[in-house]
Image: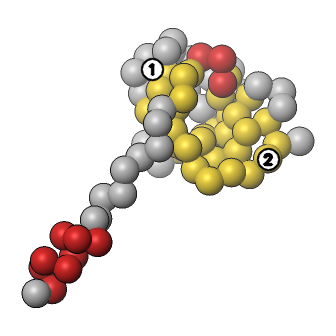
Amino acid sequence: RGDPLERSRVKAIDSFDGAGPDELAFERGDVIVVTRRHDSGMWRGELNGVSGLFPAARTRELPPALPTEAPERDALLDG
């Protein structure tokens, strides 16, 4: 059983071809958005509009993404 989480990102440290139709294939260096972590070590994620399972061991965690819109910038644009 997996735990939902606030979406995080991981970077592929190795390529994965995906053996089944529900598996997410990726190349080394791809950044995957994690949508669910499973205790089995196969996590669910999204890459280029495709969702599927992938082996977490072939990825590393990335720091949280910075907000794209800063409130200070919005205030300057409104003024």
Q: Colour scheme used in the picture?
A: secondary structure
Indicate which disc residue 27 carries: 1
Q: Residue at x 10, y 87 (%)?
A: 79
- How far is disc 1 from disc 2 in space, using C-alphas? 25 Å
Q: Secondary structure at mark 1?
A: loop
Q: 74 or 37: which is nearer to us?
A: 74
The image position of residue 69, as x and y in percent, is 29, 65
In which quadrant of the rendered view does residue 75 lie? bottom left
Relative to 3, residue 31 above or below: above
Is any atom of residue 38 visible in this view?
Answer: yes
**In screen coordinates, is 66 left or right of 52?**
left
Q: 52 or 44: which is nearer to us?
A: 44
**In screen coordinates, is 31 left or right of 6?**
left
Circle 1 or circle 2, nearest the eye: 2
Tag 2 residue: 3
Q: Residue at x 54, y 29 (%)?
A: 61
Is any atom of residue 17 visible in this view?
Answer: no
Disc 1 crowd rating (10 Å Cα; few below 14, some 14-19, many 20+) is: few
Q: Secondary structure at mark 2?
A: strand
- Tell me the amino acid under the disc marked 1: Glu
